[in-house]
Image: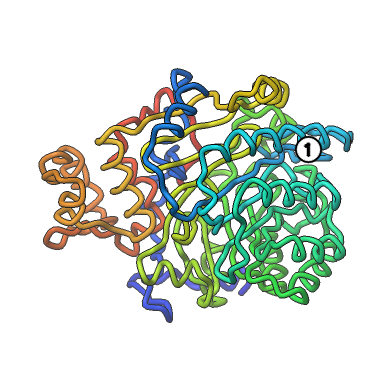
């Protein structure tokens, strides 16, 4: 449906075919609560990591923790990009020098050997994700080598239930590359689309026409990838509801299984590449609301399930099933199915997450390589979670993944009286309850259909670390 034809938003809750309540649009409340806030890919967020938790602390933790044979998730960060996208805030190295990846792969192999000493080979790698940067920068030979090194040091999985995914930039991938990725064992692809409008693409220095993406999608379908996802961004310069309509029309024509629509955060003080963007061309807060409204109307109208926090999936997708059966989880890559309780990160700036520790690698290639060459894990900073952190993480992740939590059940799980421990936070929910974002029914706190689009704001109530005056985040809308 074109933007000019859009009907007024519903005033009552609607339900998807899976029984999931759809978000209800309320422009007044969205304006009221549109403030900076964390995306909560973790709690506490990475801003709370401390240099006091270094490689020695990480090594000691891995060596002394109880043995386990539970499934494991791996994340591999490839920082290289051939060109800079002006909007990007990722940890990246912009270069055309392909030889830099050879040195990087050498160090990655050494890091794997150092980390694998602490991993029981009976632990199956049920989830694997290559992110960046641009992982396909490695080229066919480099990607083949990297997968081989992973198989040498860890127990890769060939089960149909595995989730092995890779982020690809359509500008540097051929249909032959898609075939190679399938042969290497990947069964999920994530394509960085961002926007299909030529003027928007030019404004952010990422020009990739629809004709470039269409054959890659055809190849991915021909090779029977289990899931294909698109990343879109709203709030980019020169975007309008009309251009977004056209982009979404092309997206729906390609029919990805998952769509992530992220809000662009214009923070040129933090990300130097964003200084190349004309601030006057960035949509206003009101225009961003119109863009988000366009996205939700179009994707939900086309049958996608709104999982929450920027994510839409087809009804048969594993994320939709996980949402329905209560096993949905969230990690540093976004929403995920519950296939592994721990995530170990490899490469520059990558983050590991266990039950009670977060740990991040050094952020520059030279420092990361030097630490590995010295025979030490390249950890730079991290955090040991307290009992209070684990309790609040449980509450926040339940809000994000299941749209509510039970105070009695959650308290029992942590052996505390939750109503007493979190009494100030529960009381601070009152204004949100009055605005219809949450409702309390017995011992449950539920996010309402109106509150689904503002779940980040609800989570912020329970964030003991949050200091909006000192921390810079993207806006919640």
Q: Quadrant of the N terminus?
A: bottom right
**Picture layout, residue 203 above or below residue 198:** above
Give the structural element (helix, strand or loop) at label 1: loop
Q: Looking at the image, is 88 positioned above or below residue 172? A: above
Q: Quadrant of residue 467?
A: top left
Return the residue at label 1.
Answer: 84
| Label 1 CA crowd tier, 10 Å (few <14, some 14–19, many 20+) | some
What colouring method underlies this structural image? rainbow
Locate residue 50: give its quadrant.
top left
Residue under the point 44% across and 39% down: 38
Q: Measured from the top left, where is residue 207 in percent x and y?
A: 82, 50
Do we see residue 89 in this rendering? no
Task: Name the residue rendered at 67%, 52% in the picture.
Answer: 151
Residue 381 in percent (x, y) is at 50, 25
Residue 22 rendering spot, x and y as whole percentages = 40, 69
Residue 209 locus on image (x, y percent):
83, 59
Quadrant assignment, res 186: bottom right
Task: Residue 148: tell me if it is visible.
Answer: yes
460 w.r.t. 124: above or below? above
Residue 81 relative to residue 231: left or right: right
* Residue toward you, 220 or 439: 220
- Of residue 210 and residue 44, the one placed in the foreground of this image is 44
Q: Nearer the viewer, residue 175 or 346?
A: 346
Q: Is residue 270 left or right of residue 60?
A: right
Q: Residue at x 41, y 51 (%)?
A: 30
Residue at 75% x, 40% y is 85
Q: Position of 153 compared to 16: left or right?
A: right
């Amino acid at each position: 449906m074109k933007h000019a034809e859009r009907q007024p938003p519903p005033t009552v809750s609607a339900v998807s075919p899976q029984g999931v309540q759809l978000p209800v649009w309320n422009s007044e409340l969205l304006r009221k609560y549109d403030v900076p806030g964390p995306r909560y890919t973790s709690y506490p967020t990475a801003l709370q990591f401390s240099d006091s938790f270094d490689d020695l602390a990480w090594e000691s933790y891995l060596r002394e923790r109880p043995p386990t044979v539970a499934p494991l998730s791996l994340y591999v960060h490839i920082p290289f990009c051939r060109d800079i996208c002006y909007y990007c805030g990722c940890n990246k190295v912009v270069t055309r020098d392909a030889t830099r990846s050879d040195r990087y792969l050498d160090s990655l192999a050494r890091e794997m050997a150092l980390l694998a000493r602490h991993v029981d080979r009976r632990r199956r790698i049920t989830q694997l994700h290559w992110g960046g940067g641009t992982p396909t920068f490695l080229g066919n030979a480099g990607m083949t080598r990297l997968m081989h090194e992973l198989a040498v040091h860890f127990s890769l999985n060939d089960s149909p239930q595995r989730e092995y995914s890779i982020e690809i930039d359509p500008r540097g991938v051929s249909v032959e590359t898609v075939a190679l990725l399938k042969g290497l064992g990947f069964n999920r692809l994530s394509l960085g689309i961002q926007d299909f409008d030529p003027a928007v693409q030019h404004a952010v220095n990422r020009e990739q026409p629809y004709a470039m993406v269409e054959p890659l999608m055809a190849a991915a379908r021909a090779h029977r990838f289990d899931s294909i996802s698109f990343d879109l961004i709203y709030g980019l310069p020169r975007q309008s509801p009309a251009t977004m309509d056209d982009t979404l029309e092309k997206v729906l024509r390609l029919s990805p299984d998952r769509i992530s629509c992220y809000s662009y955060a214009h923070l040129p003080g933090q990300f130097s590449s964003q200084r190349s963007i004309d601030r006057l061309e960035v949509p206003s807060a009101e225009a961003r609301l119109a863009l988000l409204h366009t996205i939700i109307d179009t994707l939900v109208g086309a049958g996608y399930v709104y999982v929450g926090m920027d994510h839409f999936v087809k009804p048969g997708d594993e994320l939709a099933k996980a949402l329905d059966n209560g096993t949905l989880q969230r990690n540093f890559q976004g929403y995920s199915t519950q296939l592994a309780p721990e995530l170990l990160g490899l490469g520059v700036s990558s983050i590991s997450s266990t039950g009670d520790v977060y740990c991040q690698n050094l952020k520059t290639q030279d420092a990361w390589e030097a630490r590995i060459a010295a025979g030490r894990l390249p950890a730079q900073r991290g955090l040991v979670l307290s009992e209070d952190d684990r309790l609040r993480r449980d509450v926040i992740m339940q809000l994000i993944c299941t749209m509510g939590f039970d105070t009695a059940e959650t308290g029992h799980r942590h052996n505390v009286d939750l109503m007493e421990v979190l009494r100030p936070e529960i009381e601070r929910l009152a204004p949100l309850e009055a605005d219809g974002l949450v409702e309390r029914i017995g011992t449950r706190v539920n996010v309402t259909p109106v509150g689904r689009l503002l779940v980040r704001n609800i989570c912020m109530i329970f964030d003991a670390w949050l200091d909006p005056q000192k921390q810079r985040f993207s806006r919640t809308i």
